[in-house]
Amino acid sequence: MKLKRFIAAFLAVATIFSVTACSGNETSSVTSEESSATSEVSKDESSKEEESKEESGKEESKTETSATESSEPETSAPETTTAEAETSAPETTTTEAETSAPETTTTAPETEKPESTPAEGSEMTDSINTFKLSEDNAKHLGRTYTDGDGTVWLSHSASALEFTFTGTKASVTVCEDITYGAGSEPRFAIYVDDERVEDILLGEKEKTIDFYSADSAKETKVRIIKLSEAANSIFGVKSVSANTTDLVPTAKNDLKIEFIGDSITCGYGVDDEVKENHFSTATEDATRAYAYKTAMNLGADYSLVSFSGHGIISGYSGDGKKQDQQLVPTFYEKVARNYSGSKIVENDWDFSRFTPDVIVINLGTNDNSYVKKDKAKEEEYKLAYIDFIKQIRAKNPNAFILCTLGTMGNELFYPMKHAVDEYKTETGDTNVDSLALPTQSAADGYAADWHPTEKSHVKAADRVTLKIKYVLGIE
């Protein structure tokens, strides 16, 4: 009996050892390519085997469990990454991206702007950076000209550069080209957030002006604008320096207007309400004249082509003789003109740079000093006016052309109106019209050399504004 019991016990132990050894071999065969569910099952089996009394079974289970745990990162990491990609891609990927790029494409390139798009903003820096004012970092208003050194020359009245920046200090370096003697120095202003902070008559070849200082940085709008006209002097903006990462051009307005005229358009003498006084760039301010005010009324970008004393067939004549060296049509296709012979303004104007929706002509006041109700001269004026409309139309095929006259006298209004009517009949071009402007009065006063005061300019601007709104259907 004892022998039988010993044999039975020996066989039982052998059987248990055999089962444990097989279980350990199966678990050890699990690889990192199997799913996490299989790993969990293997863990459970190993846990059961640890309860076995056999030490060899325990050691094999521990070894197998350790191997299974080391394989988990390889199986779980790809699953997590895939899940994140699947949930994030639909939220940020556009339809265009879905059709042109794999689902695994990152979304950053879709939100980045093309390299040619100007920066949306600027940031303050500890260092002062200096910028040339190209059209990439400043809006150009009027017929500007940029030379090889990057200096931007402002010639015509109200020509300007406008930008925003974020910083606490800024300065500008300006220069002049040629001045037509004393009383002809270029006058310009600097606006910060639409408030005039500098008004300068530039009497030196180059000058640096510190125009902005603040305790804290915020987005700030700057406009550098020429107040005086091109014929007497022009000035250039060499550079702007500020503790900012960039300058950003202000947004372009949808409506664009070009004004073609004489001293009235330039704002001749508007700062000097003594009619006996004479011309000086120091009292000329285009921002107080009807053209600039009309553009502001309509929220329009603008360009002025205007010269004091100029006309269609004759400039101002004190003795009744024709002054045919002062004709606006002669210089319309140039950047500008300058009495001192500046080479800068002799360049041809690139009409693709500014495509006006509306062109306002205000010419005839100086012609009248020559015509003086002479019927033959009125006819000459009318025919020359028709030719000028054709010249303008050739360069601006789609613009509405508004021909105005009357602020300093309406003697040539009807010859001008007849020119418009005959042009329309001859060409079939109906996108042209005429408009009489209110004549200045003693009640509103007179500026230097009997020119209109700001009150008279406001009335003219209101009349032109209403006409443009009507034609364009603006509320």
Image (cartoon, grey):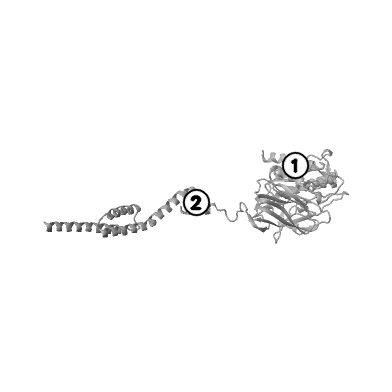
- Viewer-side residue, 375 vs 72: 72
The answer to whether residue 91 is visible is yes
Residue visible at 44% across and 51% down? 84
Residue visible at 79% across and 39% down? 438
Where is mark 1, residue-wise? Answer: 461
Farthest right residue in view:
319
Where is mark 2, residue-wise? Answer: 97
How far apart are the alpha carbons under marks 1 and 2?
Answer: 50 Å
Which quadrant would residue 409 be assigned to in this image? top right
Q: Which amino acid does label 2 sit on?
A: Ala
The answer to whether residue 261 is visible is no
- Pick whichever of labels 1 and 2 is earlier in the sequence: 2
Provide residue 97's location: percent of width, then percent of height: 50, 51
Provide residue 398's location: percent of width, then percent of height: 67, 47
Farthest left residue in view:
1
Residue visible at 12% across and 57% down? 2
Q: What element carries label 2?
A: helix
Which quadrant would residue 432 be assigned to in this image? top right
Residue visible at 35% across and 53% down? 36
